[in-house]
Image (cartoon, rainbow, N blue to C red):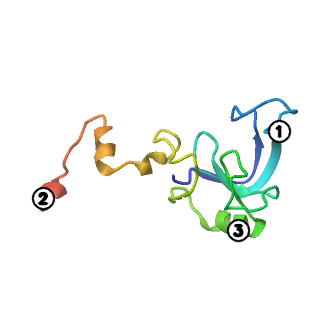
Amino acid sequence: MAVMDKQPEVHMTSCSVHITCDPGNPNFYDTTLPWDVHLTGSGTYVHYSDGDKHPGHSVGSHGCVHLSLADATWFYNYVHVGDPVTITGSPRGKAQADNGYASFDLTWQQWLAGSANGPETTAAESLSG
């Protein structure tokens, strides 16, 4: 994935990402969290969370990466839009190529195959190949 944008605070709800709109459901949430780095159009973020006992290392999330306050602050301050982010160990696997800037997951040949012009060779490739 790649960083799409970042905001010092984001209001997040389970209803907005189609998890549940029922406050009685254990998966319901409605919270505003700081130091949010946005990774996918479907709502994957890296952000601070005080409700995760093992931030950055557990499956205590609906898809976001939780960090401690110190780590979230550091990450937010040093990451830039377009920076690649690799998440390992997630049961969700890679983000789909049309979900944010996730096309970084494609090989060069896959990228070219999806081009409106089809696979093409540049002049530089012709000279070196």
* Quadrant of the frame with the C terminus: bottom left
Find disc 3 in the rendering and name its residue: 71
Q: Nearer the viewer, residue 11 or 67?
A: 67
Q: Amino acid at mark 2?
A: Gly
Say which residue appears at 33% left-offset and 37% top-offset. Answer: 114
Real-space Cα distance between discs 3 and 1?
27 Å
Q: Is residue 17 above or below residue 59?
A: above
Q: How many marks?
A: 3
Q: Which of the two labelled residues, at mark 2 and mark 1, occupies the earlier sequence position?
A: 1
Give residue 29's position: percent from left, percent from top: 81, 41
Q: Is residue 117 above or below residue 75?
A: above
Looking at the rendered structure, the secondary structure element under dot 2 is: loop
Residue 50 visible in the snapshot: yes
Which mark's residue is nearer the viewer, 3 or 1?
1
Real-space Cα distance between discs 3 and 2?
45 Å
Q: Amino acid at mark 1?
A: Pro
Residue 36 visible in the snapshot: no
Q: Is residue 2 above or below residue 99?
A: below
Looking at the rendered structure, the secondary structure element under dot 3 is: helix
Give residue 50's position: percent from left, percent from top: 82, 58
Find disc 2 in the rendering and name its residue: 129
| Residue 20 figure quarter | top right
Say which residue appears at 67% left-offset and 61% top-offset. Answer: 56
Give residue 113's position: percent from left, percent from top: 28, 39
Disc assigned to residue 26: 1
Question: Mark 1: few, some, or many residues within 10 Å (few <14, many ≥20)?
Answer: few
Question: Mark 2: few, some, or many residues within 10 Å (few <14, many ≥20)?
Answer: few
Whether tag 3 and tag 1 are in contact, CB under 8 A, the answer is no
